[in-house]
Image (spheres, rainbow, N blue to C red):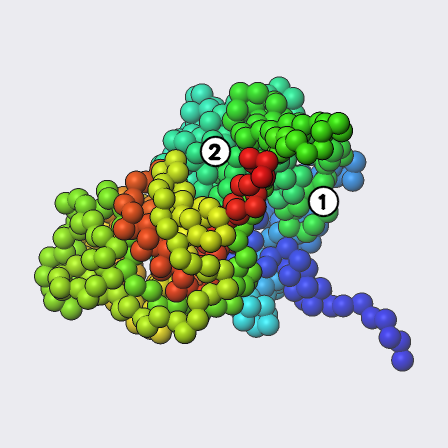
Amino acid sequence: MNKIRVLDEKTAGQIAAGEVIERPAGVLKELLENAVDAGACHIRVDIEGGGKEMIRINDDGCGMTPADLAASVLRHATSKITRFEDLNSLHTFGFRGEALYSIAAVSKLTMTSCTEGGEGSRLEIHGGKTLAQSPAPAIRGTTVEIRDLFYNVPARLKFLKSASYERACMLKVVEESALANLNVGYNVFSSGREVYHLPPQQGDEKQAVLARAKEILGQETGEALVSRFFDKLGLKIFITPPDKLVATRDLQFVFVNRRPVDSKTVQQAVYKAYQNVRPKDRHPAFIIYMELDPASFDVNIHPQKRDIRFADEHGMFAAVMKAVQETVFGSATPVQMKVPAAAPEAQKAPSAPQERVSAPLPVMTPAPAASADLFEHSAAEVSGLPHRAEDAFTPKRVFTARETEDPVEYRAVSAEEVSAPSQTPVVQTPLQTPSAPEKAPSWWHGPYHYLGQLAKTYLVFENPDGLILIDQHAAQERVLFEHYLDAFEKHNVAVQDLIFPIHVDVTPSNGESLMSWAPWLKEAGFDLTRFSPRTVLVNTVPSMMRFKEDDMKAFIVSLSQIVGDPDKSNDQLKRKMVALLACKRAIKAHDQISAAEAEGLLKNMKKCKDGMHCPHGRPCVAVLNTKDIAKLFGR
């Protein structure tokens, strides 16, 4: 019996579909590219059920004749190339002729199309089998409707995620297409609700990009972009400066000849340009356009044409890094951090060995931690936390405590006041002061004496070891992180209802991702509801994490950028969210705090499981020991 057999057309089509179409977003990408290649000026997209139930795309492009419509669903049928060498001069998105064939193999597909002044035609295909082709109204353009995606491939269907997540992925595809094709208008509807209305952009290219960027990246990020155009490689760079970095890599777009691509070479070049000015947890948002000779790169290395290979990877890296540096810093010279220069090492005097000479400044070393792994610890209960002075304000939004329904007043609270049992039931649920641990953590070498605040950033203490410097922001991040995490893990997060919900603007795709986590976030104290495609309402907040309205909006926007896939580990997201909460709520560098607050913060650090690191892994404490100090004076 022969072991080698030729697969039937149906099986081969379903396998091919898996290479090109992984999820509804892949279908949408292929159909949008076809619409743009057809010269469309306006594209309407309708989505139902996260794309699994229905995807419909209507464009006003050149359309197809009845004969072309029938041929368009055949495998390897394309109008883009006739021979392999044509790939070296390709200026269209599609070229292999597999998209419609693959989509038709795993869905119920209906296409209607007509050329200018021609005859309209309608084609219906289910699971790769043509059911009918009939006349249709003579309206120029093409409409493609896909229903019941993967209905005949249940193994593929079960790997799709929630409707909100799949919808978010599809909106990302629209965003990429809209940034790549500024002269095309997009109207996107999800279950009959308009998500995007993006009119065609005409005139000045820079202003056109910025207008689209504000709609897609968000108003604040879009307005922060700095830009510069370069003749070399046709580079056009729009990027956020170092003081406007964002919390995620999601707002990074690279286009080569208007094709959205993934390129580690380009991404690493951007990060190299920022290497001395970027905190580990912040990322540049950018839109980078290139116009290259099609022969200088290859997009045919993956069925989805997402990955790209440049003929000169090293040259591309150097060119992009230099261009980013010039765009952001005004110079191609790498920006260096300002580091205090160490004192020059003096030459020893051989004739007078007993004479002391000046020594280099000692290196400040982080104090030893109880454990280097931040997330292996459950949270410790803590007593009162220092609060920033600017928290004493009259809020625009009035909060009410769920337990009492009384108005909540925001005000500054001293460390002594918070550590004592609360006498004011309207502020927040009192923090319970735990009993002192039986033995202090290994890093604790008391007694500590507070000396003052250095540069309004570092708290200076004296202990038997020498001088202790504490990063006030990192330290309070850790305290808040452990306190909130402890309450969250015990399902004991007290919440406050807002009399007037806070409206937060997010991008539609991030809004979809955020709402997919709404039930889980409610357990964390945040009750979120949808107001519009670009707006979510915050109805409740955790009592222990009191924010000003602007700070709360900033937190929700940052949260929308990190939640992502709803099937990711709840534990992973929980720690990210709590770390973000703690970071936003903690006192900042250059905030003035009192001696009582500084001492209270040190006591709270002592109660933490890991008081020596912030939730992001940075050290909170550095020690300049007495021996190193003595060396400064030749003792």
Q: Answer whether residue 69 is visible to the viewer in this image.
A: yes
Corner quadrant of residue 577: bottom left
Residue at image location 60% in from the left, 57% down from the top: 21
Residue furthest toward the left? Answer: 406
Determine crowd level at label 1: few under 14, some 14-19, many 20+ residues with C-alpha closer than 10 A: some
209 with respect to 348 (left or right): left
SS category of the residue bearing label 2:
helix
Residue at image location 35% in from the left, 59% down from the top: 603
When the figure is inspected, residue 520 is found, relative to residue 350, above or below; the finding is below
191 with respect to 156 (left or right): left
Viewer-proximal residue among 576 and 222: 576
Q: Which mark is residue 300?
A: 1
Residue at image location 56% in from the left, 53% down from the top: 26
Give the label, 1 or 2, closer to the camera: 2
Q: Give the labeled residue for mark 2.
A: 242
Dot 1 and dot 2 residues touching (CB under 8 Å): no
Q: Of the residues shown, which amino acid type is indicated by label 1? A: Asn
Q: Of the residues shown, which amino acid type is indicated by label 2? A: Pro
Corner quadrant of residue 130: bottom right
Q: How many marks?
A: 2
Give the mark, 1 or 2, whose residue is nearer the N terminus.
2
Viewer-proximal residue among 139 and 562: 562
Q: Position of residue 452 (x, y in %)?
A: 35, 42
Residue at image location 35% in from the left, 68% down from the top: 381
Q: Quadrant of the C terminus?
A: top right
Q: Position of residue 462 (x, y in %)?
A: 42, 48
Viewer-proximal residue among 250 and 361: 361
SS category of the residue bearing label 1:
loop
Q: Which mark is residue 534?
A: none
Viewer-proximal residue among 65 and 21: 21
Residue furthest toward the right? Answer: 1
Q: Position of residue 268 (x, y in %)?
A: 63, 39
